[in-house]
C-alpha cells in the first residue's frame, strides 16, 4: 500500500478551500496551515500562463524529515504516510530544516505539526478533508498499489510532475499538468 | 516576467517568508561544541604524545572549562527545543541517521569523559581535595596512572564532536548552503582554532604559547582554504547553491562575513600571531579573542543564512 | 458641516462593555482544541451534525454544521444531496465557522445617545431598543404615512423584515443586488427571452461544449455550482473563451483568451453576431422556430464586421471569426455566459441584450449544454391577513426614469430620503439588514446626505460594519448558524428544499431576524401577521403542505423532488417563451416604445487620461464582498487586497512588488488606506485591478480595519443605465500616490 495524491493543475482555481477545510478538520491554529496554494505566473502580457498548485507535505518515500528526527517522532505509518507523534517530538526543529518543501511548522504547543493525509479519515475509508471539499474536484487520493484507484488512473492517463524531484525525496504528491 | 506567490495560506511564524526556526541558541551550541572539541583534542593528543608536562595549559587548565562549555552548550540546545518537557525522548532512542540524535549521544559520552579528565587533575589545583569515598580515590589514582588510556577515546570523540558541529548543518539536503560535506571538516578546524585560542589565552608558558600559536596559524590557513573551496563548490553547483553562495558573495551577508569572519576573525589574528612568533610584542589576548569572536559570528551567519536558502521549484 | 448623525465608532463604548465582550468572546471561542489529535490517528469527537444552508454568499449551499459536545462549531461540510454544492462547500462556506466565532461580533442592542455633547452608543436591552423603534415607526407613519419606511436588505434576513414592512404598509424594499449588480443582465434577458437567468443561474455548464465568459470570472467568483460545473466541463474538454482585460483564473484555463480593451465588449459582441449571421453559421432552425426580428437584426449588424471591431477592441479579426466558429460548432451546447455583476458602463442592458441575442442565435436557451429550463418547488405562504396596499411605492421614486426597472433601485430610494421642498414621496426611516451600504453603494455623498436626514435608521447585522456607525439603533443579529430561516426553495435543474436550523444557541444577546421582526411587528399592533411563537412552526407547517415535516428535514437537511416539466425544450413541442409574443425578441419593441434603441449599439466610453488607469474590481474566491474581511478563517487565506499593476506600468512609476501606495481617482479622491502593489503580467497596461471588499475604516472590525483599499470609495463617477437604473461603475480611473497624502480633517 502506498498512499499518494494527484492534483490537477488544469482544474484548480486556487480557491483555497483545501486550506480552510484542513484548518477546521484538523484544528490547525489560525495563522498556521498544513496546506497552501501557490500561484506561478509566467510569460508576458498577453501571452501569459498561470499554474495553481495546492501544496502540502509530500509524504516522501525518502523522507529527510523522518531520517533526521532524533527521537523517532517523525515516522511512517501505513501506506507511507509521514506522521509526527506529538508526545515523542522534542521540537528541535531538525525536520523543519530538512524539508525542502517547508511543509512543517512549529505548533504553538511546541511540537512540530504537518499534513497527516487526514489519516483519521483515511482509516475510515474517506478521502482527506482537502480532497473531499475541493469544489473543482481537482484532487485525487488513493493507493498507488491499487491499479483501480483514481490516482493510478490519473497518473496513467496524464502527464504529471512532482516538486523539487532533484532534492531526491521521492515525493508522493503528483501534479497533473 | 515570472511571478511566484502564495495565493493563500502561508504566513506561518518562523517559516515565512523564510525559515527562522533556529535562533541564537544553535550557533552558540555549535560554537561551544567546537571549542570543547578543540581543547579536548589538543589535551588528548599531547597526552598521548607524552608531552603533557610541557603543555600545562593545554592538558590541565583549558580542559577545566570544557565540562562547563559542554553542559552550557547542551543547555543552549535545550533552550532551542520547542517541546521542552519531552527532552528526555532524545535518550530513549538511538537513531544513527539523525545528526541531532548523534550529537546528543556524542555529548552524552564526551561530557563524562571530560569530567573524568578534569577530576583527575583537580588535586593539582586544589591539593587538599578529598573525594570522601575510598573507591573514588582508588579510581582517581587509576585514572591518573592511565591517562593515556582515557586520552585515546577522548581524542577520538573530540574529533567526532568537532565534525558533528558541521554535520548537524550539512546533513540538511534541503538547505543548499549547508548541504556540502566540506562543512564537517571546516567546522572541526574552526572549532580547533577556537580551542587553541583559549589555550593560548590561558597559558603562562611562553613555549607552549608558541607551539599553540604555530598550530593556530596552520589551522587558520586550512580554514581559509576550506572556505574558498566551500564557495568554489557552490559556484560550480546548482542554481540553488549559486544563490546560496551569492548571499556571501555580494548579498546580504557579504559585509559581516568578510569583515568579522574572514578579516577580523582569521586573517588579522593570523598576522598578529605571525608577528608574535617573529618576536614582535603582541598582547596575546588580542588574536585569541578575535579568533573566538570570529568563530562565533561565523556560526551565527551560517545558521542564519542557511535557513534562508531553499530549493527552487 | 453640521452632521446630525455622527459616525460612531462602536469601540468608544465603556470599558464594561469591552470587558464583557472580551470575556464572552473567550468563552465563545474557548479552547479551540476539544480533542487531542496528536498523532493524527484519532478522529475528532463530534456531538451532532445540524442541517443548515450557507449565508456567506447568495448561493446558499446546503450543509451540515458539526457541533462538538461542548457546543462549538467545529466544521461545516456540504450536503451531498444539494445539487447546488454536491457536498462540497466553497472556502467561504467551509470558513463560515469564522462568522460565528468572530470576536468582533455585535453583542447587544446599541442606542445612540448624546453624552456631554458627544454622540455615542450605549448598550440597551432588547425591550428598550424595540420599543424605541416601534415608537419612531409609528411617528413616521403618523406624520408621513407608513410608505416612508424603507428596507435595504441582502440575504435571508431580508425576508423577515420585508414581512414587517409589508404588514406596516410599505413596499419600499430594495437591495443593492439589482441596481448595483445583476439588474442589467436580468433586464436584458427579460427583454429578449421573457425571463432572466435567475440565481443560481440556469446555465448548463456541466454539459456545455463551449462557454464564453465576458468579464465573468468564474473561479474567482466562487459561485459554487458554476465552479464545479466549469471544472467538469474542463474535464470533458469543453472550449472556454474568456473576454477580459485581465488574465482571470478562468482565462488561464481557456482555449481562447481575448484580452480586450476595457469598455469595448459590446463591439466584440456585435461583431460576433455579424459573423454568425453573415458567415451563415447561426442556428437557423432554432431562430426560425423561436425568434422574431431576425431580418432587422441582420440589417442592423451589417457593418459590425470583425475588422470594424478590431479597431475598437484590439482583438484581431481572425480571432473574432475563429471564436465565433467555435461557438457555432458547439451550438446549441454553447453558453455565452450572462455574467452577474453587470453594472459597468451605463449601456449594460444593451450589452446583456447582445449576449442574449448571441445565445438565441446559437440556440442555447432550452438546449442541453446551453441554458436549461428551471423548475422549483412551490412552498405555500404561512396563513396571514392580506397586506395593506401602500398609497405609493418605490416605482413612484423613479419619477419617470428607468421605465424597464422590474425591481426597486437603491439609489432612487436613497434620493427619496433627501428632503426637498415639494417632494411628494419622501422616505424618513430605514431598516438596513445584512448589507453594508457604505461599501456597496457608489455616490457616497448622496448616501451620506440621505442618512443625515432620516428620522430613524435601524441597522440589523451580525458584525459592526461601517453602516452600523450611522444607526440610531443597532440590533445584533445572530449568525445563520444560530437561527431558523425560510426554507431554501430555489428553482434550478432539480427542485430542492433545504432547511436551516440553529446548530447552537445564539451567542451573547443576539437574536434571529424572524424574532426581531415579530417583536417590532407586535409592538406596532401587527401581531396578526406573526401568528406563531417560534419560526419553526412556520417551517413545519410549510413542510407539511408539501408532504414533509420538520423532523424529517432535520434528519436529511435537503430534499430533492422529481421534475414535472422537461429540463430542455422538447423539439416537438410548441415552446412558448415568456415574452409578449411567445418568441425570442431580437428586435425589442418594448425598448423602442420606451424610447431606447431596439437593438444594441456600440457607444464609445471614456478612456483614462495619461497617468491614469481604469479601475477594474472583482472578486477573490476566499471572500464575499466586504462581509468576510474580518472572518478569521478567511483572512488567514487572504488578509488584504492588492492593486495589480502591469510590469510596464510598474517600471514607469518605479513601483516595486509589495510596496504600499495610495490610489487617487479622476476626481481627486484618495483612498483611505494604502494598498500593496502586485506587479503582474495578468493585467493590461491601461488598467489596474483590485479585489472588492477590503479597506474597512471601522475600527470595531479589529482585524479588517485599515487592511487594503476599498474600491467603492474610488468610484465617484457612475454611468446610470437609463433603461433600468443600474449604476455603471467601471468608468473610474486611478493613479498612484507614493507618499502618504495629508489627511483632511474629518468632520
Image: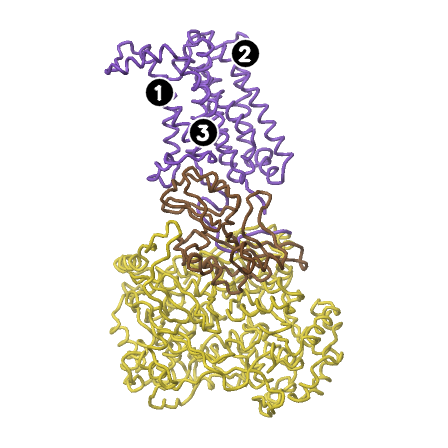
Question: Which chain comes out brown in the rendered image?
Answer: A
Does C353 sit above or below residue B128? below
**Residue named by callout 2:** B275
Residue occupying image coordinates x 62% and y 40% = B239
Colour in which chain C is shown? Answer: yellow
- CA–CA distance in space, label 2 to label 1: 36 Å
Mark 2 touches mark 3? (CB < 8 Å): no
Question: Which chain comes out purple in the rendered image?
Answer: B
Q: Do we see residue C2 in this rendering?
A: no
Residue occupying image coordinates x 40% and y 27% = B107
The crowding category of the residue bearing disc 1, from other C-alpha atoms within 10 Å (few below 14, some 14 to 19, many at least 20), is some
Q: Mark 2 lies on which chain?
A: B
Q: Which chain carries label 1?
A: B
**Residue named by callout 3:** B30
Q: Do we see residue C46 in this rendering?
A: yes
Q: Earlier in the sequence, mark 1 or mark 3?
A: 3
Amino acid at each position: 500500500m502506498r498512499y499518494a495524491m494527484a492534483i490537477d493543475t488544469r482544474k484548480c482555481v486556487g480557491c483555497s478551500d483545501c486550506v480552510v477545510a484542513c484548518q477546521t478538520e484538523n484544528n490547525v491554529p489560525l495563522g498556521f496551515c498544513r496546506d497552501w496554494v501557490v500561484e506561478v505566473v509566467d510569460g508576458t502580457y498577453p501571452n501569459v500562463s498561470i499554474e495553481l498548485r495546492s501544496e502540502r507535505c509530500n509524504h516522501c518515500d525518502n523522507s529527510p524529515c523522518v531520517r533526521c528526527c532524533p527521537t523517532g517522532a517523525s515516522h511512517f505509518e501505513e501506506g507511507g504516510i509521514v506522521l509526527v507523534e506529538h508526545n515523542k517530538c522534542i521540537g528541535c526543529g531538525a525536520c523543519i530544516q530538512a524539508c525542502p518543501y517547508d511543509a512543517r511548522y512549529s505548533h504553538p504547543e511546541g511540537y512540530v505539526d504537518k499534513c497527516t493525509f487526514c489519516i483519521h479519515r483515511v482509516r475510515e475509508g474517506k478521502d482527506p478533508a482537502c480532497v473531499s471539499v475541493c469544489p473543482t474536484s481537482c484532487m485525487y487520493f488513493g493507493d498507488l498499489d491499487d491499479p483501480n484507484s483514481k490516482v493510478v488512473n490519473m497518473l496513467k492517463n496524464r502527464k504529471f510532475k512532482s516538486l523539487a524531484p532533484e532534492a531526491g525525496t521521492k515525493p508522493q504528491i503528483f501534479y497533473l499538468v | 516576467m515570472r511571478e511566484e506567490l502564495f495565493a493563500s495560506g502561508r504566513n506561518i511564524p518562523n517559516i515565512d517568508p523564510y525559515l527562522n526556526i533556529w535562533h541564537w541558541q544553535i550557533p552558540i551550541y555549535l560554537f561551544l561544541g567546537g571549542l570543547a572539541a578543540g581543547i579536548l583534542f589538543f589535551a588528548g593528543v599531547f597526552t598521548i604524545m607524552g608531552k603533557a608536562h610541557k603543555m600545562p595549559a593545554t592538558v590541565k587548565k583549558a580542559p577545566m572549562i570544557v565540562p562547563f562549555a559542554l553542559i552550557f552548550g547542551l543547555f543552549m540546545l535545550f533552550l532551542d527545543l520547542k517541546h521542552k518537557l519531552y527532552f528526555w525522548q532524545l535518550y530513549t532512542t538511538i537513531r544513527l541517521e539523525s545528526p541531532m540524535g548523534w550529537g546528543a549521544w556524542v555529548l552524552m559520552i564526551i561530557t563524562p569523559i571530560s569530567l573524568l579528565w578534569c577530576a583527575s587533575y583537580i588535586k593539582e589545583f586544589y591539593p587538599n581535595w578529598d573525594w570522601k569515598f575510598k573507591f573514588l580515590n582508588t579510581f582517581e589514582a587509576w585514572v591518573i596512572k592511565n591517562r593515556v588510556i582515557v586520552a585515546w577515546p577522548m581524542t577520538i570523540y573530540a574529533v567526532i564532536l568537532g565534525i558533528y558541529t558541521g554535520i548537524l548543518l550539512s546533513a540538511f539536503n534541503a538547505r543548499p548552503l549547508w548541504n556540502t560535506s566540506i562543512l564537517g571538516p571546516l567546522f572541526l578546524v574552526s572549532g580547533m582554532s577556537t580551542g587553541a585560542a583559549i589555550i593560548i589565552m590561558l597559558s603562562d608558558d611562553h613555549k607552549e604559547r608558541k607551539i599553540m600559536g604555530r598550530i593556530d596559524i596552520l589551522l587558520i590557513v586550512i580554514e581559509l582554504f576550506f572556505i574558498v573551496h566551500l564557495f568554489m563548490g557552490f559556484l560550480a553547483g546548482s542554481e540553488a547553491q549559486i544563490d546560496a553562495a551569492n548571499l556571501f558573495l555580494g548579498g546580504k551577508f557579504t559585509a559581516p562575513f568578510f569583515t568579522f569572519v574572514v578579516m577580523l576573525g582569521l586573517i588579522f589574528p593570523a598576522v598578529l600571531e605571525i608577528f608574535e612568533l617573529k618576536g614582535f610584542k603582541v598582547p596575546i589576548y588580542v588574536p585569541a579573542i578575535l579568533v573566538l569572536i570570529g568563530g562565533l559570528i561565523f556560526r551565527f551567519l551560517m545558521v542564519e543564512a542557511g535557513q534562508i536558502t531553499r530549493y527552487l521549484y | 458641516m453640521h452632521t446630525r448623525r455622527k459616525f460612531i465608532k462602536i469601540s468608544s463604548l465603556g470599558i464594561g462593555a469591552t470587558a464583557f465582550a472580551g470575556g464572552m468572546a473567550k468563552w465563545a471561542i474557548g479552547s479551540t482544541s476539544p480533542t487531542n489529535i496528536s498523532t493524527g490517528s484519532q478522529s475528532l469527537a463530534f456531538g451532532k451534525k445540524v442541517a443548515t444552508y450557507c449565508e456567506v454568499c447568495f448561493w446558499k449551499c446546503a450543509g451540515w454544521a458539526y457541533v462538538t459536545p461542548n457546543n462549538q462549531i467545529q466544521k461545516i461540510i456540504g450536503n451531498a444531496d444539494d445539487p447546488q454544492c454536491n457536498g462540497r462547500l466553497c472556502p467561504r462556506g467551509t470558513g463560515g465557522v469564522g462568522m460565528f466565532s468572530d470576536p468582533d461580533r455585535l453583542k447587544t442592542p446599541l442606542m445612540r445617545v448624546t453624552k456631554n455633547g458627544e454622540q455615542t452608543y450605549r448598550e440597551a436591552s432588547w425591550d428598550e431598543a424595540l420599543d424605541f423603534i416601534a415608537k419612531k415607526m409609528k411617528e413616521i407613519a403618523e406624520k408621513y404615512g407608513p410608505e416612508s419606511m424603507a428596507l435595504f436588505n441582502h440575504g435571508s434576513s431580508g425576508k423577515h423584515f420585508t414581512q414587517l414592512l409589508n404588514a406596516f404598509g410599505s413596499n419600499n424594499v430594495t437591495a443593492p443586488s439589482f441596481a448595483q449588480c445583476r439588474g442589467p443582465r436580468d433586464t436584458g434577458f427579460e427583454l429578449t427571452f421573457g425571463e432572466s437567468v435567475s440565481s443560481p443561474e440556469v446555465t448548463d455548464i456541466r454539459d456545455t461544449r463551449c462557454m464564453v465568459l465576458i468579464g465573468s470570472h468564474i473561479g474567482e467568483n466562487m459561485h459554487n455550482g458554476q465552479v464545479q460545473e466549469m471544472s467538469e466541463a474542463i474535464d470533458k474538454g469543453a472550449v472556454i473563451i474568456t473576454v477580459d482585460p485581465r488574465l482571470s483564473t478562468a482565462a488561464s484555463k481557456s482555449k481562447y483568451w481575448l484580452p480586450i480593451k476595457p469598455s469595448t465588449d459590446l463591439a466584440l459582441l456585435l461583431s460576433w453576431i455579424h459573423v454568425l449571421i453573415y458567415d451563415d453559421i447561426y442556428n437557423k432552425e432554432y431562430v426560425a422556430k423561436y425568434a422574431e426580428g431576425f431580418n432587422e437584426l441582420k440589417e442592423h449588424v451589417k457593418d459590425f464586421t470583425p475588422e470594424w471591431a478590431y479597431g475598437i477592441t484590439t482583438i484581431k479579426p481572425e480571432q473574432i471569426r475563429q471564436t465565433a466558429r467555435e461557438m457555432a460548432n458547439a451550438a446549441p451546447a454553447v453558453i455565452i455566459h450572462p455574467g452577474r455583476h453587470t453594472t459597468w458602463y451605463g449601456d449594460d442592458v444593451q450589452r446583456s441584450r447582445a449576449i442574449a441575442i448571441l445565445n438565441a442565435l446559437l440556440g442555447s436557451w432550452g438546449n442541453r449544454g446551453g441554458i436549461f429550463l428551471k423548475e422549483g418547488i412551490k412552498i405555500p405562504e404561512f396563513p396571514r391577513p392580506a397586506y395593506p396596499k401602500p398609497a405609493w411605492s418605490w416605482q413612484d421614486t423613479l419619477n419617470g426614469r428607468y421605465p424597464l426597472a422590474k425591481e426597486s433601485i437603491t439609489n432612487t430610494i436613497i434620493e427619496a430620503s433627501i428632503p426637498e421642498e415639494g417632494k411628494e414621496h419622501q422616505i424618513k426611516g430605514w431598516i438596513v439588514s445584512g448589507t453594508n451600504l457604505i461599501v456597496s453603494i457608489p455616490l457616497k455623498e448622496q448616501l451620506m446626505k440621505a442618512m443625515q436626514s432620516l428620522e430613524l435608521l435601524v441597522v440589523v447585522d451580525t458584525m459592526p460594519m461601517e453602516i452600523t456607525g450611522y444607526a440610531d439603533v443597532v440590533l445584533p443579529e445572530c449568525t445563520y448558524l444560530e437561527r431558523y430561516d425560510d426554507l431554501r426553495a430555489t428553482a434550478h435543474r432539480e427542485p430542492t428544499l433545504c432547511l436551516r436550523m440553529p446548530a447552537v444557541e445564539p451567542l451573547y444577546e443576539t437574536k434571529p431576524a424572524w424574532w426581531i421582526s415579530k417583536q417590532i411587528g407586535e409592538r406596532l399592533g401587527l401581531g396578526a401577521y406573526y401568528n406563531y411563537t417560534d419560526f419553526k412552526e412556520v417551517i413545519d407547517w410549510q413542510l407539511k403542505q408539501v408532504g414533509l415535516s420538520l423532523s424529517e428535514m432535520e434528519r436529511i437537511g435537503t430534499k430533492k423532488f422529481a421534475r414535472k416539466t422537461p429540463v430542455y425544450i422538447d423539439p416537438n413541442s410548441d415552446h412558448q417563451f415568456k415574452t409578449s409574443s411567445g418568441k425570442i425578441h431580437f428586435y425589442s419593441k418594448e425598448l423602442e416604445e420606451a424610447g431606447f434603441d431596439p437593438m444594441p449599439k456600440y457607444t464609445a466610453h471614456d478612456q483614462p487620461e495619461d497617468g491614469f488607469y481604469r479601475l477594474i474590481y472583482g472578486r477573490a474566491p476566499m471572500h464575499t464582498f466586504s462581509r468576510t474581511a474580518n472572518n478569521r478563517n478567511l483572512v488567514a487565506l487572504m488578509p488584504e487586497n492588492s492593486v495589480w499593476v502591469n510590469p510596464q506600468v510598474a517600471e514607469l512609476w518605479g513601483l516595486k512588488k509589495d510596496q504600499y501606495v495610495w490610489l487617487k481617482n479622476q476626481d481627486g479622491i484618495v483612498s483611505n488606506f494604502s494598498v500593496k502593489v502586485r506587479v503582474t503580467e495578468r493585467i493590461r497596461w491601461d488598467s489596474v485591478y483590485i479585489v472588492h471588499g477590503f479597506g474597512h475604516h471601522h475600527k470595531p472590525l479589529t482585524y479588517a480595519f485599515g487592511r487594503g483599499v476599498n474600491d467603492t470609495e474610488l468610484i465617484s463617477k457612475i454611468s446610470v443605465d437609463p433603461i433600468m437604473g443600474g449604476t455603471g461603475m467601471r468608468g473610474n480611473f486611478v493613479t498612484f500616490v507614493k507618499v502618504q497624502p495629508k489627511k483632511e480633517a474629518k468632520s
